[in-house]
Image: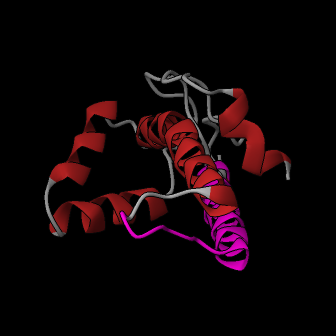
Amino acid sequence: MEWMLMPLKRYADFSGRSRRKEYWMFILFVVLASFALSLVLTLLGLSADEEGSLFGVGGAMLIILLLFALGVIIPSIAVQVRRFHDQDKSGWFVLLNLIPYLGGIIVLVFMCLEGTRGPNRYGADPKGGGSEEIFA
């Protein structure tokens, strides 16, 4: 659970490095929380009157779901920038997400790649490993 909430503790921290585990556990948290909120929204029922305006508990849950999405967008971008930093790449690589279809696939591949071992220009290795050789 600690790994899931770590990006929320580092809400708008775009500096440093983040491990793959931190990134993927946060993504898992966001997916599970979104699913749970959507499930509650569905169970309570989304009702609308004849004009199509939302009211009641369903409307309130929809607002809560939208607020949750707005609340996690900044930490999502921040943890993605730190993942790029872990691979010794600029955080501006996040803009690849704006390329339709192909950009998301490219970023997905980058998020699955291992970071550079040892310190790089963005900070120390988040895994705590040094730059020593294994067979030295």
Is 119 in front, or is 93?
93
Question: Magenta residues, as a range?
Answer: 22-51
Query: What percent of the width, then of the height, locates residue 50?
Result: 40, 70
Compared with residue 83, is residue 37 higher up or lower down, i.e. above or below?
below
When asked about the image quadrant of residue 110, the answer is bottom left
Q: Is residue 18 magenta?
A: no
The outermost residue toward the front is 50
Q: Is residue 20 visible?
A: no
> Is 28 one of the magenta-colored residues?
yes
Q: Can residue 122 be seen in this view?
A: yes
Query: Going 61% across and 27% down the picture, which residue do you hit?
Result: 11
Residue nearest the viewer, comparing 84 with 66? 66
101 or 69: nearer the eye? 69
For residue 41, above or below residue 116: below
Is residue 99 found left or right of 23 in the rendered image?
Answer: left
What residue is shown at x 55% (from left), y 22% (from top)? 13
Question: Is the magenta region chiefly helix, strand or loop?
Answer: helix
Q: Which colour scheme is used?
A: secondary structure
At x 68%, y 63%, the residue is 37
Q: Residue furthest right?
A: 1
Where residue 71 appears, x then y in whole percent?
57, 37
x, y percentage for residue 107? 32, 58
Q: Is residue 92 left or right of residue 55?
A: left
Residue closest to the eye, 72 or 36: 36
Identify the residue at image location x=74%, y=50%.
4
